[in-house]
Image (cartoon, rainbow, N blue to C red):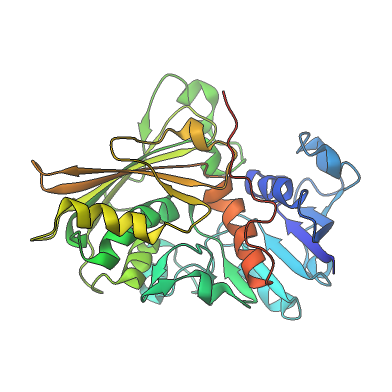
């Protein structure tokens, strides 16, 4: 059976990446693509690399246009997805690539986003450790899925095994991330102009203000961290690469834990995962190695002098960080082979 699919926000980076992956999916028929100001234009005017979808024209993003499909992807700016969800009540599967349905806590939503708190949906990071199992089990048969924030899932995948195994102390986490500007979307912004970011590195959302912080806390609580026992210093830095996240996270080592137990926590957690790799000791990932791949690549160091575990994670923010996670979650929810249409090989050089 072929699934009819609509992708909103198809002129943007996340929407375009969802389309790139779905274009190679054997069980999918991309019937509808929508946008706002670009409606009425050919898709190729905004996504010229998607040659196999040259027949598609951008339609207005309205409930009427999105309705009537088997699967709808909402790749819209944060705060714009929830307005469509009631109108899509008869759609078998809706996947939101924005932030609207990620947070369980109304207090977190009020503190970091504001306004009415939308209903939380199943969280689209299958590999996350949850209550002794994996988030994957909560995605099977799901009809509503919230794809993750790219920074949030990268840090959460980095730390969840150590939290679940009790080998690190989540009360003193420090994460510093080098991120590419595509994570901020395609809208024209002065601070994202080439002349503003080339040759420089720019910190932003410093001092606990980034909206992905409550999402990380939520994931680590699900992995077993105490409800009030998570403290994280989170600092993203904009760097001049179009795609990619390199996240360096560290946390104190728990008492009486051996080096072997620490490494085993990560290796056992991800041993059977097709899209999360733990590199050999002494090896660390580069963002170039995951470009175009639906893979989170992790390197682990044990710093006994500082009594901390250091995890370096690399992802392509538009693939494993967003679109790949969405398509992977779709496959699981619909009972399709999880790896369908998702690349593990990167692009080099």
Q: With respect to residue 184, does 229 lie above or below?
A: below
Residue 35 location in percent, x, y? 76, 52
Residue that extends furthest to the bottom in the rendered view of this protein: 90
Rendered location of residue 185, percent (x, y)? 58, 44
348 up-or-down from 307: above or below? above
Displayed quadrant of residue 189: top right
Q: Which residue is drawn at 49% across and 37% down?
A: 244
Specify whether 238 is left or right of 221: right
Q: On screen, 105 above or below 269? A: below
* Quadrant where the image shows the C terminus: top right
Q: In the rendered view, does 93 fall on the left or right side of 99?
A: right
User: Residue at 63% across / 45% down in the picture?
Assistant: 343
Query: Looking at this view, is 101 or 165 the one in front?
Result: 165
Q: Is residue 49 visible?
A: yes
Horizontally, residue 9 falls left or right of residue 133, namely right
What residue occupies the far right of the structure in this picture?
A: 55
Q: So how many labels did they put on this image?
A: 0
From the top left corner, tell me how far across and down residue 283 is, in percent. Answer: 33, 35
Q: Is residue 191 visible?
A: no
């Amino acid at each position: 059976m072929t699934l009819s699919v609509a992708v909103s926000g198809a002129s943007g980076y996340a929407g375009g990446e969802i389309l790139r992956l779905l274009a190679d999916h054997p069980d999918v028929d991309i019937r509808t693509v929508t946008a706002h100001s670009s409606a009425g234009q050919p898709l190729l005017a905004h996504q010229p690399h998607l040659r196999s979808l040259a027949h598609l024209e951008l339609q207005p993003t309205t409930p009427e246009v999105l309705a009537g499909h088997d699967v709808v992807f909402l790749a819209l700016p944060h705060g714009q997805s929830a307005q469509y969800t009631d109108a899509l009540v008869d759609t078998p599967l809706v996947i939101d690539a924005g932030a609207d349905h990620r947070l369980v806590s109304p207090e977190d939503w009020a503190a970091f986003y504001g306004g009415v708190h939308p209903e939380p949906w199943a969280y689209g990071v299958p590999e996350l450790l949850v209550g002794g199992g994996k988030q994957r089990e909560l995605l099977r048969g799901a009809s509503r899925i919230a794809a993750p924030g790219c920074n949030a899932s990268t840090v959460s995948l980095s730390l969840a095994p150590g939290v679940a195994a009790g080998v690190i102390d989540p009360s003193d986490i420090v994460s510093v991330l080098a991120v590419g500007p595509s994570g901020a979307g395609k809208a024209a912004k002065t601070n994202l102009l080439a002349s503003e970011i080339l040759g420089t590195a720019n910190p932003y959302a410093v001092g606990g203000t980034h909206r992905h912080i409550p999402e990380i806390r939520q994931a680590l609580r699900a992995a077993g961290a105490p409800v009030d026992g998570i403290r994280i210093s989170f600092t993203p830095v904009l760097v001049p690469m179009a795609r990619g996240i390199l996240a360096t996270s560290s946390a104190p080592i728990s008492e009486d834990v051996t080096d072997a137990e620490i490494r085993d926590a990560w290796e056992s957690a991800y041993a059977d995962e097709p899209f999360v790799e733990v590199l050999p000791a002494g090896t660390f990932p580069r963002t170039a190695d995951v470009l175009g791949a639906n893979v989170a690549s992790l390197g682990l160091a044990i710093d006994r002098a500082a009594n901390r575990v250091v995890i370096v994670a690399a992802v392509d923010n538009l693939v494993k960080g967003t679109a790949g996670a969405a398509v992977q979650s779709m496959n699981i929810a619909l009972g399709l082979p999880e790896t369908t249409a998702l690349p593990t090989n990167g692009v080099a050089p």
